[in-house]
Image (tube, rainbow, N blue to C red):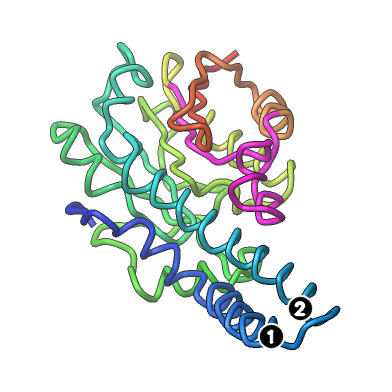
Amino acid sequence: MSERGKWDGMLAIARFNWPFYAAAGGVLLLSSAAISLGGLFSLAAGFSILLCAYFLIGSLGVSHLVYDCSDLYGWKWLERAPGNIRREKITLCHSGFDEASAMLKQKFPQAAWSVLDHYDPVIMTEASIRRARKLFPPTEGTISARFDRWPLADASQDVVFGMLAIHELRSVAGRAAWFAEARRCLADDGKIILVEHVRDLANFVAFGPGFLHFHSVASWQKSWETSGFKLDDSFRITPFVRVFVLKKS
């Protein structure tokens, strides 16, 4: 996915989560038909229409803003995130859906790249991941690796990217194990660049209860501090996506 179309990000989200959008669309149509019944039926139907329209327009609109219109995949933010980090050896970790490695390899063509796929159907049970994986299989050269056991040498990497993927590790302990393995593989002056939605007001407004799939900043911080990292920099790409740059403490 090195070439992106104008609507690719939003369409991918819709395809990965199509049962939710299909259900919302169905309820919208039924409610529109029921509103003519009057009385409480009309009131309930109107409320349903508002909720479904909010979900469809809000989540898909924000997805378009984040994944198609922002700098997320424009990569200008990389000028701030890596800074003066050495970029000779770079690892990108994902959890079954890799949208970034091809583009990042174009940005850093001289680097020695490792792309690790942490997908585990036992612990990553969401149907959306299975759909994403089926539609976009791992790229050539991707290495299947447990999130807590990477086939990389100690202190061998300059940068580790986690791009909208590590939140699939649902427990603080699981994320701490990922950070611990990253720490083992990073050089002393190496850094993690973690890009994630977080559980905050902006994502609640955008995704409603779906924001619970993300983790709070405090939860992330507990995971990385437990594993010997501290925050070096943090900034937003749109109000909905945060970048955390971490270094060894």
Disc 2 secondary structure class? helix
Q: Which residue is drawn at the image coordinates 71% and 51% (left, top)?
A: 212
Q: Quadrant of the C terminus?
A: top right
Separation (CA) of disc 2 from disc 1: 6 Å
Identify whether 19 is placed above or below 140: below
Identify whether 239 is placed above or below 150: above
- Residue 203 horizontal/vertical position (percent): 61, 43
The residue indicated by pointer 1 is: 36
The quadrant where residue 111 appears: top left
Q: Which residues are magenta?
A: 191-217
User: Residue 65 vs residue 37: left or right?
Assistant: left
Label 1 amino acid?
Answer: Ser
Question: Label for residue 57?
Answer: none
- Residue 80 horizontal/vertical position (percent): 35, 17
The residue indicated by pointer 2 is: 42
User: Is residue 214 magenta-colored?
Assistant: yes
Label 2 amino acid?
Answer: Ser
Q: Which residue is drawn at the image coordinates 67% and 30% (left, top)?
A: 217
In terms of depth relative to the viewer, which is nearer, 209 or 29? Answer: 29
User: Is residue 213 magenta-colored?
Assistant: yes
**Dots 2 and 1: beta carbons under 8 Å?**
yes
Disc 1 secondary structure class? helix
In terms of depth relative to the viewer, which is nearer, 149 or 107? Answer: 107
Q: Which residue is drawn at the image coordinates 52% and 26% (left, top)?
A: 244
Mark toward the start of the polypeptide (2 vs 1): 1
